[in-house]
Image (cartoon, grey):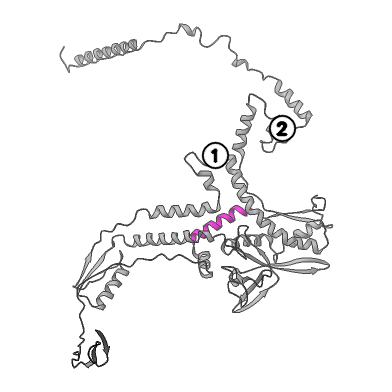
Amino acid sequence: MLQKTLNDGVILINNATKPVKSSNKPEPIEFKPTARQGVVYIAPGGQIFDEPKLTLEYISELSQSSIYARSVLNKLLWLVFTGEPDIEVYDPSGNPVPAGTPGKPTLYNDIKTMLEVPEVDLWGNMQWALIDSYWWGNCILNPVWQYVGNVYTLTELTRLAPESFCYEPPEGEVYNPLLKGITLKNGTPVYYYQDNEGNVKELKNYHSIQPPHSMKLGGSPMIQPLILPLAYLNQAWTAVSQTTNRAGAPSLFLRVTDGDEDTIAYCREVLRNWGKNTSFPLPENVEIVDPHIKEPANTAEAIRMLQNLLIDYFSPVSLLQSGERGGIFDNSTEKVALIMAFIEGMHSWLEDAFEKLLQVYLIANRYDGYSVRIKLPLPDIDRTEANQRWVEVLANAKVPIVNTNELRRFVPNVEELDDAGLAALKEEMAVAPAVSPMMQQEEPLVTNMATLQTPTEQEGYDEIHRALNNARKDIMAQLQEAGYINA
């Protein structure tokens, strides 16, 4: 038997009878308003962690407000840029071009003067190269070359804000994940599109500087691997802030019995603003429930671990301090060498990027075979203590290891000696110093050491016992004489 539902009732159909129309119609159902009943528990809504995305807005927020991200960058700047760069110019034979006189400048003077012009500012732009590579993965400069007289000269070197390259151009195939204005078209060279208040324009005169580790078209931000740890740090500090705010006002739940919509909304607002400096009246049908939740005690430890993670990413500190027995470089000299190697590595790609720009000057002005080198200075490190130890070890070695001049190199402001100077020093050292008559002794201060007797342990005890007895007798005699005790 089949059952088919129609608008006007139910018709029963089988293969033995004809369809018969049912006369039973369902009675209409009356829907009445219902009341809110039962018990509802309202819990404070916690902040949900949302993994950050690599976007223009997020990088801009980090660069302005993240104390951890800016702290790491500041430390890098202090390490890498300890002084203004030195300029070295070499002729085709590899000989350095010296500085000329005011009346007769050389190629060295021309290049150095060009780079010190405020509109060029090599020193400042090298720092911007590291800053923009740190945040955005690319530093984009606009070099302006003009003829000054008959010399093709760099007259301006302007930094272009990377934020202006974050908008996708109307055409392109492969884009940089962050700086979408950097793109490829039909496999052609890289195109740079800059946005100016909604007007996207192709930039043709640019000098791009990217960190050497970049894996993406147009560069990858140096800070990109740290975006997630930085978000964890913000989350951890939010938890610390909430814990501080709840001091004297612990976590709680609200139990609502037969509450209406307004009551539940009010309770949620209470929990949202619950803290040590707030108080709220509660309706009669609302009760406070203590869930006995204890605040985590390891939030501060998590923050310290994340801070160390940020520092270790940019410095070799972990190599120096890891392991129970110290790092792989335990000697102070090797530690200094490792840190210097790290700084030199940072110097290398920055110097190379600007040296390529200066090659344009040499090529355009027909200085064939000439080259320019930019040298950022390394930090000054006091090696006095280490040098003193080396001198002590080498000078007192049983087998001669170094000669006199090699030892003198460890002493500041001491020059090496020629053959005549070494001979004079050797003759001087061969003369034994005179001994003062006051220091001479006809006889030893202590004679016949073998005749001195050392008392045994028992003899020492006997001597102490005799001394105590004599003291006791003297005290008793004085007390009798004074009349305090009878004889």
Name the kind of residue labelled 2 in the image: Asn
Q: Secondary structure at mark 1?
A: loop
Where does the image place residue 97, in percent across and percent down from the top left?
80, 52
Helix, strand, or loop for circle 2? helix
Between 51 and 299, the residue placed more toward the observer is 51
Dot 1: within a 10 Å radius of its alpha carbon, few (fewer than 14), some, or many (20 or more) residues? few
Q: Closer to the camera: disc 1 or disc 2?
A: 1
**Of 210 and 331, the residue lying toward us:** 210
Q: Quadrant of residue 354?
A: bottom right
Q: Main secondary structure of the magenta part?
A: helix
Q: Left of 412 or right of it: where is 8?
A: left
**Image coordinates for residue 400, horizontal then vertical, percent:** 67, 26
In magenta, the rendered stretch is 66-84
x, y percent for residue 213? 60, 57
Quadrant of the rendering where the N terminus is positioned: bottom left
Question: Is 24 rendered above or below residue 61?
Answer: below
Q: CA distance from mark 1 to mark 2?
A: 28 Å
Q: Looking at the image, can residue 4 be seen?
A: yes
Q: Is residue 68 magenta?
A: yes
Q: Which residue is mark 1?
A: 330
> Which is nearer the N-term, disc 1 or disc 2?
1
Name the foreground residue: 202 vs 427. Answer: 202
The number of numbered discs placed on residues in the rendered structure image is 2
- Residue 353 placement, left or right of 64: right
Q: Amino acid at mark 1?
A: Asp
* Residue 186 in picture, x, y percent from top left: 66, 72
Picture residue at 15% right of the left edge, 14% below the top:
486
- Residue to which mark 2 is pinned: 405
- From this view, report whether residue 132 is shown above or below residue 402: below
